[in-house]
Image: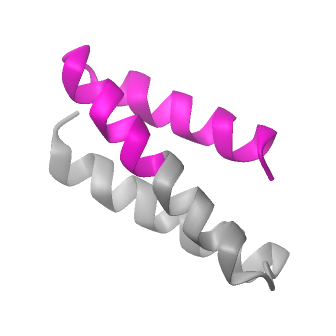
Amino acid sequence: MDLFLYIIFSFVYLMVIHFAVAIRNQFNLFLMIGIFILGAVIGSQMHSYSTGLVFAVVASLLFW
């Protein structure tokens, strides 16, 4: 997985969670975007964006 696919999967996941669950607080959306940016950094450091994506999804579900 490269950075472009990571961005697309992250965007789709964030939009599904935002519209399906109806996150009303803008701070929560900002926090989730920050978690996915952190996941991208972790993925780039580990040379595996799929690991970063899994971290971001799990962290967003934990901090939600």
Quarter of the view holding residue 14:
bottom right
Scheme of image coloration? one colour
- Above-or-below relation of 18 to 17: below
Name which residue lies at 81% across and 82% down: 22
Residue 50 rendering spot, x and y as whole percentages:
37, 28
On the picture, is 60 further left or further right than 11?
right
On the picture, is 55 further left or further right than 36?
right
Magenta stretch in the rendered image: 36-64
Residue furthest out toward the top: 46
Let me know if residue 47 is in the magenta part: yes
Quarter of the view holding residue 26:
bottom right
Name which residue lies at 54% across and 28% down: 55
- Above-or-below relation of 30 to 52: below
Residue 34 rendering spot, x and y as whole percentages:
48, 55
Quarter of the image that includes the N terminus: top left
- Above-or-below relation of 34 to 52: below
What is the tally of numbered marks visible in this picture? 0
Name which residue lies at 40% across and 29% down: 52
- The answer to which of 41 and 15 lies nearer the viewer is 41
On the picture, is 46 further left or further right than 23?
left
Name which residue lies at 16% across and 38% down: 2
On the picture, is 35 further left or further right than 42?
right
Let me know if residue 52 is in the magenta part: yes
Residue 30 rendering spot, x and y as whole percentages:
56, 69
Residue 41 rendering spot, x and y as whole percentages:
29, 34
Q: Main secondary structure of the magenta part?
A: helix
